[in-house]
Image (cartoon, helix red, strand yellow):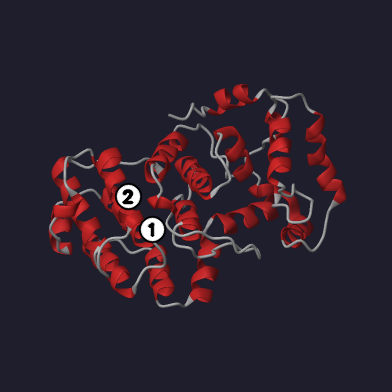
């Protein structure tokens, strides 16, 4: 997933459309303004005063957006914008839908955002989990480890059982030399009090790439760090990368718990924090440089005994800007 830069004329049209969506239910929110300003500087590279931009119709936008790939990127951007300050209103979603229709973009994500705005939250969450990285993780867990391991991992993730034999394999990372990937992972789990695979509340092995991204990418586990990890992963993920960003924005900026677990922690407006939107875009670009899709049945075992800098070099994880 790479961020495309439109031509200046199209960029200005896009920024006007973003403001039109953000103003659907009144004045744009703090996070929406921060996101638009970050997009202006980092992606669009145009000089414009967002506060003075005039509204635009869907037809006007479509006339100036010829690229299909750019249209997809822009609609995804509008969806993030709609969620930046909380669960969007029906009016906001209607504006997003109108621009998407004019651009010829119809996706399940758009239908799901309508469900969310209309408070059909169970249907929204079920479809989101099925199509998102959560569904990918469960399918990969089944493919890689079998039915029994999938069942155990789901029960373990819910805190209902522990697989001591499996957990022992990961706890052994404590004995690796300091500075290796495995030892760094063990320290990460201990410092955050997270469950390792096989432990109660531990994540399935097929989803451990998320934690590797925290460690290899150097990202924190606070809301801003989680948004960066999701964006970094979206950069290298080959299938449905936008769902990662959507998932994180829902939890940490829209305040909606999209998780499959009982954990209920959410925040509102993380994209409004200083620099958060810029770091999101930077993480996408950094992830796009990674030479392996770590989310697609990546075998991490050959890396656990490597020095962490060597592993980063092999995977082309460049230093964060």
Image quadrant where one finds the N terminus: top left
Q: Is residue 318 above or below residue 190?
A: above
Q: Earlier in the sequence, mark 1 or mark 2?
A: 2
Measure the alpha-carbon separation of dots 1 and 2: 9 Å
Which quadrant would residue 139 be assigned to in this image?
bottom right
Tell me if residue 65 can be seen: no
Q: Which residue is mark 2?
A: 34
In depth, the one of 25 and 55 nearer the eye is 25
The image shows residue 270 at horizontal and vertical percentages of 44, 52
**Residue shown at the point (45%, 32%) measured from the top left:** 289
Tell me if residue 302 can be seen: yes
In depth, the one of 215 and 37 nearer the eye is 37
Which quadrant would residue 75 be assigned to in this image?
bottom left
> Secondary structure beneath disc 2?
helix
The image shows residue 25 at horizontal and vertical percentages of 27, 70
The image shows residue 30 at horizontal and vertical percentages of 33, 56
> Secondary structure beneath disc 1?
loop
**Residue shown at the point (21%, 57%) measured from the top left:** 17
Q: Which residue is mark 1?
A: 84
**Residue shown at the point (69%, 55%) measured from the top left:** 142
Q: Is residue 280 above or below residue 156?
A: above
The image shows residue 252 at horizontal and vertical percentages of 49, 56
In depth, the one of 125 and 274 nearer the eye is 274
12 sits left or right of 264 in the view: left
Image quadrant where one finds the C terminus: top left
């Amino acid at each position: 997933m790479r961020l495309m830069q439109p031509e200046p004329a199209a960029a200005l049209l896009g920024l006007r459309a973003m403001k039109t969506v953000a103003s659907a239910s009144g004045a744009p929110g703090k996070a929406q303004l921060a996101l638009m300003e970050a997009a202006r500087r980092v992606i669009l590279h145009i000089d414009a005063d967002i506060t003075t931009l005039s509204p635009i119709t869907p037809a006007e936008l479509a006339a100036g957006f010829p690229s299909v790939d750019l249209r997809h990127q822009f609609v995804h951007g509008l969806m993030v914008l709609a969620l930046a300050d909380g669960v969007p209103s029906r009016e906001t979603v209607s504006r997003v839908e109108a621009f998407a229709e004019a651009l010829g973009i119809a996706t399940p994500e758009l239908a799901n955002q309508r469900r969310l705005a209309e408070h059909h939250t169970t249907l929204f969450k079920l479809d989101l989990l099925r199509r998102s990285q959560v569904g990918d993780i469960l399918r990969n867990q089944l493919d890689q480890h079998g039915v029994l391991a999938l069942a155990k991992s789901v029960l373990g993730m819910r805190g209902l059982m522990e697989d001591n034999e499996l957990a022992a394999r990961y706890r052994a990372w404590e004995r690796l030399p300091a500075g290796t990937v495995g030892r760094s992972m063990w320290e990460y789990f201990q410092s955050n009090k997270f469950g390792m695979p096989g432990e109660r509340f531990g994540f399935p092995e097929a989803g451990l790439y998320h934690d590797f991204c925290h460690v290899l990418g150097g990202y924190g586990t606070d809301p801003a760090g989680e948004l960066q990890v999701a964006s970094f992963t979206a950069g290298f993920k080959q299938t449905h990368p936008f769902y990662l960003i959507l998932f994180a924005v829902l939890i940490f900026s829209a305040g909606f718990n999209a998780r499959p677990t009982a954990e209920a922690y959410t925040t509102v407006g993380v994209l409004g924090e200083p620099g958060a939107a810029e770091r999101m875009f930077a993480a996408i670009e950094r992830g796009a440089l990674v030479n392996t899709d770590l989310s697609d049945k990546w075998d991490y075992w050959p890396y656990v005994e490597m020095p962490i800098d060597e592993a980063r070099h092999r995977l082309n994880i460049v230093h964060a800007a």
